[in-house]
Amino acid sequence: MTMRSKQLRSELVAMLPRLRRFALALSRNRQDADDLVQTAVVRALTQEESAQNAERLDSWMYRIVKNLWIDERRRQAVRGTPEPIDNLNDTSGEDGRRHTEARSDLAQAQRIFDRMSPEMQTAAVLVIVNGLSYREAADLLEVPIGTVMSRVSRARRTLAEGLTQTPNGMASNQ
Amino acid sequence: MTRLFTDEQLSAYLDGVGDPATCAAIDQALATDSILQKRMERFRRADQLLREVVDGRLGMVPARLEQVAAGQVAGFGAKKPSPVRRIAQLAAMAAALLIAFGVGTEMGHHPVAPTLVFGPNGLTAGPVLAQAISTAYSGEPVKTEAGAISVALSFRSSKGDLCRRFRLDQGAQSQTVVACRQDGRWRIEGWASSPPEPGDNGFTTASGPSNTAIDAVIESLGIAQTLNRGEEASAIKSGWRGKTH
């Protein structure tokens, strides 16, 4: 394996968390997200020269994930309703006595996040969680930069307002 | 004073992209304006919770993804992570799916022949798996050292490559794989973990979400022609030398 191949693999491993977050925002389902990322990684490894020559590997990978998801969405449109969003973090299987304020805030944040539009979720994940610039997110999502700015802002406001409306929301802001 | 700044301006400030004059004004106001401080704190808290929601939902990066991306040999007999929470248990289940799905490199040394091999042409089937893909008929499961192979579909891609979609069962672990014949090897175009049979945790089977990535791979390859039984037999006999371009 050449140094460039090793470097590529190392970079791919490092960006897996970011790719999975983006894929989750698109697919709203962890298993689908991992399948999307896995397919994208295999695609990168089978097109290694293109991957190595990409000006920005992360942008190139984000784009592959997005295009795979667009293909998948077309198929879902034919097949029927997509799976509902995961609820892997529901606390039903955990000890109810351990519901701390922080956990309650997190549960509320999950509910608010799930109710956001896919567009808002995707912009928020890319910018707030993955740290893309507005310009990078706009280029990837193929929307004006102002649209990204607006979606990110609305996502923040929606979360902040939703949290302050819960009994524990204000307590969390101490 | 707080009302002077819109949510969008505060949001841009947090993301470090606000215009300099506005950012300077926000900085100045934050020094004394307690209402603005609380607004900003709520936004920061929202950001933090958003990260926790997303990363909590995803759990650990599955071992299979790391192994594939790194081109490392899958750990035969590797220890499963000790789950302490339900999310961790689910992540460990996902990670375990590929532990037996051996991945090696052409330069590597393996105690057992790897199921998949990384080489200059990308990810290809190891010798045992390749033999099974080359000789199995659709609908007739074949048992090999690499696991049980059940070919579901043989087709010619839009580029003219001969490809097969099959299920690889290794004990309780299953993968759905798409491979195409290129340069005398079966190149792996994509795969996805196949869910357990119906009745186990309510997962669905063939048309379920785990196959969405496989469907996407096949769609990207394009199906120019589906091989019938006779054409499949000819391809097996000729060693899958059927590229048309």
Image (cartoon, coloured by chain):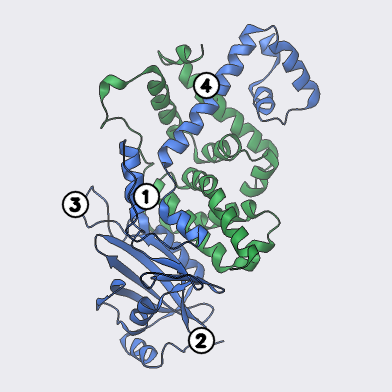
Mark drawn on residue B199: 3
**Quadrant (top left, top right, bottom left, bottom right) of the N terminus of chain A:** bottom right
Residue B243 numbered mark, or none: 2
The residue tagged with tag 2: helix, strand or loop?
A: loop
Whether pointer 3 and pointer 2 mark residues with C-beta atoms closer than 8 Å, the reply is: no
| Tag 1–tag 3 contact (CB < 8 Å) | no
Mark linked to residue A160: 4
SS at badge 4: helix
- Mark found first going from the N terminus, 3 or 2: 3
Colour of the chain lettered B = blue
Q: Is residue A77 visible?
A: no
Distance (Cα) linking label 1 and label 4 = 30 Å
User: Mark 1 belongs to which amino acid?
Assistant: Thr
User: Looking at the image, which residue sits at the far right?
Assistant: B21
Q: Are marks 1 and 2 in contact (CB under 8 Å)?
A: no
Kindly identify the amino acid type of the residue bearing the numbered disc 2: Lys
Residue furthest left in the image = B199
The CA distance from mark 1 to mark 3 is 21 Å
Dot 1 crowding, Cα within 10 Å, few <14, some 14–19, many 20+: few
Residue at coordinates 54% horizontally, 78% vertically from top-left? B159
Find residue A38 and report its horizontal and vertical position in percent. Answer: 47, 57
Element under disc 3: loop
Task: Check disc 3 and give the amino acid type.
Answer: Gly
Secondary-structure class at tag 1: loop
Foreground pick, B79 / B231: B79
Mark 4 closeness class: few <14, some 14–19, many ≥20 residues within 10 Å: many
Q: In which chain is the residue bearing label 2?
A: B
* Chain A palette colour: green
Q: Amino acid at mark 4?
A: Ala
Q: Are marks 2 and 4 on the same chain?
A: no
Q: Return the residue at label 1.
A: A81
The residues tagged by marks 4 and 3 sit, at their Cα atoms, a distance apart of 40 Å
